[in-house]
Image: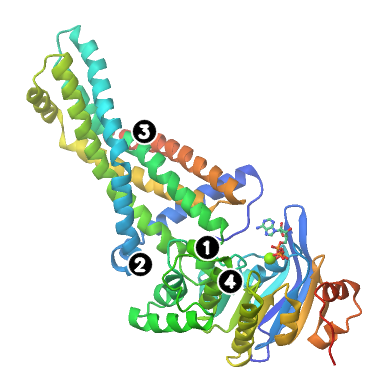
Amino acid sequence: MTLTREPIEGPVAAAVAAVGRTARLTAAALAGLPAALFRRDCRATFLRQLYLIGIGSLAVATVVALFTGMILGLQLGIAFRQFSQELMVAFTLSYAMLREMGPFMTGIILAACVGSSMAAQLGTMTVNEEVAALEMMSVDPIRFLVVPRLWAMTLMAPILSFYTCVIAFLGGALVGYTQLNIPFLQFIGQVMEAAEPKDLYVGLLKAAVFGVLISGISCAVGFATTQGAAGVGASTRRAVILSFLAILVGGYFITRFFYVF
Amino acid sequence: MSSEPAIVFEGVVKRFGPRRVLDGLALSVAKGELFVIIGPSGTGKSVTLKLASGQLFPTAGTVRLLGEDLGALGSRALAKLRRRVGYLFQSGALLGWKTLAENVALPLAERDRLPPAQVEGRVRAALAEVGLADAGDLYPAEVSGGMVKRAAFARAIIEDPEVLFFDEPTSGLDPVMARTVDNLIAQVGRARGATCVVVTHDLAGALRYADRIGFLKDGRFLQVAAPDAILHTPVPEVRAFLEAQRVEHRP
Ligand SMILES: Nc1ncnc2c1ncn2[C@@H]1O[C@H](COP(=O)(O)OP(=O)(O)OP(=O)(O)O)[C@@H](O)[C@H]1O
Ligand SMILES: [Mg+2]
């Protein structure tokens, strides 16, 4: 697959071509797993990306998850208190986080924190002709640059998603204890009771799919960068917006697939 | 087919949107020839090199490299053909997160997957050739533009490719280092028999090693000739170039 190519004329044709390019790039990167594991340089980048993604988004994920848990706890608490059903807060929080909010928020955080910088970095490399130089050296930019990033994010996303859920439960339990007079351990116990293995697995799968979508889109957008530094800025923004859209649309269809049929 | 030229352009037109950069360009570079392209800034010299190496494709006309029609090649075949080609980008295009030595090692380590011990010796030799023996451990951001250029030069020639494209190999270099690089080009061209296409603004240097020089302007070659003929050129634009650089014919 060649990345250096001519621009395609016309907005519709260009959009269709961009989707096709992103899909091909993502598929090629997914197929490159052996390289990420067994090729020295690729593996080094893979491990560094794992670290960057994990550590880089941990602080943001912690704060976001904690307050999401607290906000949900508060809102649900206000609602359920009217029926004296305060413990339902834990049940509902468990469902909401495991099924939707955990993977969704992880996706948003990853798109904003990591996808943007992937697009910026690959975009800068593209306008500096570094990507063209790799191709001229017959070093496949997808294997060299995309495979380690995509697999690192795909692996890291479920882990972060699980972490996000746990922190949100703690946030909910905190609100439950301070505002709703639910003992901390009882709240957590209720959360565990409500948690279905299926919800957990589907949520983790969803996060992994988001990881594929975000990294695939961000890398493809980065490679499509033109026109220097301004182009890099535009690509960064485009990568984040398209990732958000992909997370929303993709999330809906995964939910539909696993819970409706 | 050893008689076929290494590079052939036939009626090549290259447009970017409404802008016509090349307009019916014809060119034939023989195997082992040292061909130099000169011309004003922005006339399409870099575009010509990119067309010749399959990074861009013509709007009309055909480009043949080592007997292959580049427009007809699939991406796999193109990647295979590129193994026989070295390319020095005008900007150097080194990877920013790798040291100069790691950059020069890239084709050997990443493409050919040679063992590190074997790579190291060749990289050290290549860096020494361009006067960077002590700079191997520095990152591109830590060295001067001229040093980046020289490391990129070393990276382009380290595989001993059959065809080499150099986009302004000596711009940004001091005169002494420019002479060193000119000599290296002459050496890879003469001793190793590589076909070289060099884009440069340094006409004095080019006159020393070129087999032929082509003057590109307005999408075509105004003149393609041996250095001697270029020195006695009747073409006013080429004359102007010579005079601006004070290149005089010394008998
Ligand atoms: N990818 C591209 N998209 C659009 N226009 C381009 C592209 N590449 C080159 N051009 C245009 O083609 C023209 C020729 O560019 P090129 O880089 O070949 O000039 P050059 O002869 O190498 O000049 P210089 O001596 O300054 O390097 C320029 O006007 C440039 O704007
Ligand atoms: Mg140029």
Q: Which residue is mark 3?
A: A252
Q: Residues within 10 Å of mark 1 (few under 14, many from 20)?
A: many
Foreground: disc 4 or disc 1: 1
Foreground: disc 2 or disc 4: 2
Circle 1: residue type: Glu
Q: Nearer the viewer, residue B86 or A191?
A: B86
In the image, what residue occupies the spot 36% across and 58% down?
A148
First-in-chain label (2 vs 3): 2
The spot of residue A201 in percent (x, y) is 21, 41
Q: Which residue is mark 1?
A: A130
Spatial distance from mark 4 to mark 3, Cα to Cα? 41 Å
Secondary structure of residue under mark 1: helix
Q: Are marks 4 and 1 in contact (CB under 8 Å)?
A: no
Q: Is residue A257 visible?
A: no
Spatial distance from mark 3 to mark 1, Cα to Cα? 38 Å
Circle 2: residue type: Asp
Q: Is residue B32 visible?
A: yes
Foreground: disc 3 or disc 1: 1
Foreground: disc 2 or disc 3: 2
Q: Quadrant of the C terminus of chain A?
A: top left
Q: Which residue is mark 2?
A: A41
Marks 4 and 3 share the same chain: no
Q: Is residue A33 above or below residue B69?
A: above
Determine which quarter of the picture holds residue B119. bottom left
Left or right: A139 in relation to A227 = left
Q: Which residue is mark 4?
A: B73
- Quadrant containing ligand 1 reads bottom right
Marks 2 and 4 share the same chain: no
- Chain holding disc 2: A
Spatial distance from mark 2 to mark 4, Cα to Cα? 29 Å
Spatial distance from mark 4 to mark 1, Cα to Cα? 23 Å
